[in-house]
Structure formats: structure tokens, C-alpha cells
Amino acid sequence: MMLAHQKERPNITAAAPAPSSPSRRRRKATAAHPISPAAAPSLNGDGYGGMEETARQLIARLAATPDSAVRGLPFLHRALTLPLLSAASAALRLSLLLSRLRPRRALPVPVVSVGNLTWGGNGKTPMVEFLARSFHRLGVSPLILTRGYAGGDEQKMLRRRLSDTSAKIGVGANRTAVASSMLQEYGFTHHFQTTCAEKKLSSACKLESGSRIGVAILDDGMQHWSLLRDVEIVMVNGLAPWGNTHFIPRGPMREPLSTLGRADIVIIHNADMASEAQLKSIRSTIADNSATCSVFYSRLAPSHLFEVKQPLQRLPLNVLNDKIVLCVSAIGCPNAFIHTVREIGPLKVDRLDFSDHHFFNAHDLEIIQEMVRNLMDQHSKDIIVLVTEKDYDRDPAALRTLDAKVWVLSSSLQIMPHKEQGEDEFMGKVDEIITITGCAKSHAVDRATSCWWCG
């Protein structure tokens, strides 16, 4: 969803309206730029993306509004919308607390949870991929457990990007049941010892050792309490770490800051775009709430481009150098996308942002097409529509219908070297925590094993 920092757009040029009198459609296209936090969208359904998208952006804007700025909101939002959102936040927090009373299960393999305290833009999915590739290189076959949120754009991206690895992906809200099914299908090999269950499975399933699951990665695991975990990794967006500190939907928080005390490792994502003062403030908050956890920095590093109609053909990043680019995205932190594109060095960058996980409908595609025509009229050059991989995997067929060059920016998460803390140190810390927790956990697993495989 759109975040408060989105109002800061230095050196990003917006498309100007055509010189002639605009048509009704052209008026929509010109107004289709990201909504400023200073101006609330109307709820008449006339905005891009339709009524639902406009409402989602309104909620996102209100969720990014700090308490000190509430007086500046329109009266209707102060008198009605904010109280409703606050009530919903209280109900959600109560539901979260009640969910933690349920019993928790242990898997017979190490479980690494990747989660966040706030919605969207924290680098959670790229971190899941990073871990899966790292375990694969170590000869450990990973199982990714994901709920498949909002049309499954994240799981689709993971399947495509990890197709050359031993990673397996289990999708479903009941991740305990999904894990049980996939461990039974593929077998498992314990990271520390060979359990009775493994011997039983290896005999029953007759699987080769290389195909057995050696670790489970719990995607979006911070709020998923049904499974015990060995390692708790928390992702924090370095550009907008805590928002206004209110719970969803009044704010972006999914957990209170005190939950950082559960973290074994905290990753400050987009650290390359944050100032030293921002990073220092975030580290101070982490230290106040979790004195014992390790802190690392990460970034999304662009590697290449590909066309939506030719996804297997890689294009070097420098093909953007003399291009006019329209960045279209429906992701949690569009400012990070824009920053990355600007760093590549295109001639000019324009943007069109939708809320996180938004599916592009026919009206959205018309607006994109209209913005492309406007930019072509202004510059007499071909326009490149640039999207993220998440946007591509959500609905590649829709993007192929555009009468324009549509390219996809491919990026991967990197652990940034900082005070002798790099990728090797990060994976070393993960392995160290698994080793410490695994010995105690193995006894519980042995006692519970029969529950997994018996009728």
C-alpha cells in the first residue's frame, strides 16, 4: 500500500497534460499519479482502479497519518472514518492475542520464520527467496510455507524464480496441514540427527536423499502461531519502519514494537536508501525492544530486465539509459522501486502507483495506455512501461495486452556488508541459532512424530 514517505519524490518528473483541451479520459489519466498524503481521494468511484482501489488508497493514507496531523484531515474522516478504523484495530489486536492461545506444533525439520511488524514493502518475499537459494547451495532442500495471499503473486514469483533449485512450495492458510502433507510426500532429513520418523519415511517412500526436505521457511510467519520456529527473522522497511505506530487499519502495524523481543535476527531492508540518521533511529528502537538480536542491512539489487512477451530473453540494465520510462506498480513500497529505476539512469521517469496486490483491470490498462500516449506526444520517443516482477507474476496476460513496450525489472535481495556483517555472517548466524535450538527441539519432535504420520 502507499506509504507516508511517498510524498517525497525529488527529481521524479510527472507527465504534463496535453496542450489541447483534455477529454474526460485524459483528465483521469492526468490525475492518475500517486495520491499525495495532503489530499484525500474522493470515494465517487471515478478514480483509477475504481471504487475499491480508491477506498484502499484512502485507508492507506489515513493509516500513514500521524496523530499530530489528524487535525488537518477533513471533518468526515476525523468524525467517522478514523473512529471506525480505530475500533477495527482494537478488534484485530484482540483477535491476534486470542490466536496465541492455540496449541503450537513442532516440525521434524528446522523452521525459519520470515515476518514483519508492518504491512507491505519490508522485503519479506525477497528474503524468503534468498534463504531458499542459500539453503539449496548448502545442499539442504527447503520447503517454503506460504498462505498464498491476494491472488498469489508472491508464490507465483517464488515458483518462477526458484524453478532451478530444490525448493518446494506449499500453499495454504493452514500451514501446519500443508507441511504435514508435503513432509509425508517428499520425506525429510533432520538437520541434526536421524529420527525414527525419517527412517520410517525413507523406507515407506523410497525417496532419494537429495529430494528430502531439510528445512522449512515460514513465509509471513510473525503472526502465524500454529508452528514452533527455530529462527525468527523480522524484516523492517528502512524507509518507513513503524508508520504512525497504530494497528491495522488505523495504522500499518501488525504487531506492537515490543514483539521485536521475539526476534533472533532483524533485517533493515532498503537500507541503501535510508539516511544514517534513519538507520540509527531504527537500530535504537530495535535495541530498546530486543537487546539480544542481531541486526543486518539488506537491499534489492537490480540484475536485468525482460520483456513481458519474451520473459526468457534478458536485457541489460543500461538499455534504459536514454529511455522515457513509465513505472507502473502495485507493491508495498513503490518509492523504493522508483529510486532503483532512477539509479539505473533513464532519461526521464514518470510513475503510476496502485495499492499493494492490486489486479490491473481494463480501466487501469486504459489509463496506462493514455499516459503512454501523453508521454509519446511530449517527447516523440518510444515509452517503456516498467513493472516489478511481483506485478508481472500477478497477471502477465493483462500486461501483454498493452500497446507499448512493457519491460520487467528483475532484482534480488542482498545482505549489505556493514561492520563485518555480510551474507556469510548472516547465514552463519542462522545456522548457529538452528544448532542451538535444534537439540532441544529434537526431543519434542521425537515425542510428536507419530501424530504427523499416523491416521
Image (cartoon, grey):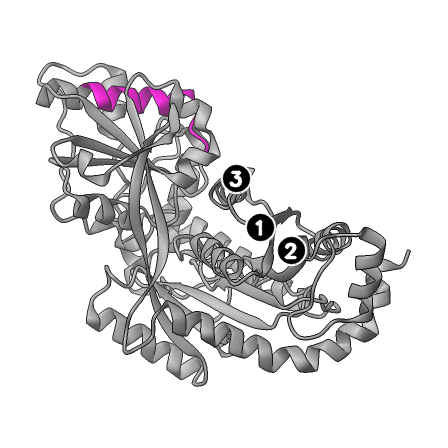
SS of the residue under disc 1: loop
Query: Does any portion of residue 397 appear in the rendered image?
Result: yes
- Residue 213 figure quarter: bottom right
Q: Which residue position holds label 1?
A: 166
The answer to whether the residues at label 2 and label 3 have Cβ atoms under 8 Å apart is no
Q: Which tag is nearer the camera, tag 2 or tag 1? A: 2
Q: Which residue position holds label 3?
A: 156
Q: Compare marks 2 and 1 and give the one earlier in the sequence.
A: 1
Is the residue marked by circle 1 packed among few (<14), some (14-19), or many (20+) residues within 10 Å? many
- Looking at the rendered structure, the kind of residue marked 3 is Lys
> Residue 244 appears at what percent x and percent y?
36, 63
Q: Which residue position holds label 2?
A: 210
- Residue 124 figure quarter: bottom left
Q: Which residues are magenta?
A: 359-373
Q: Is 97 situated left or right of 22 in this image?
A: right
> Residue 340 appears at what percent x and percent y?
24, 48
SS of the residue under disc 3: helix
Indicate whether 316 appears above or below 72.
above
- Looking at the rendered structure, the kind of residue marked 2 is Gly
Query: Does any portion of residue 262 appear in the rendered image?
Result: no
> Residue 377 appears at what percent x and percent y?
12, 18
Disc number placed over residue 239 in the picture, else none: none
Answer whether residue 368 is magenta in the image: yes
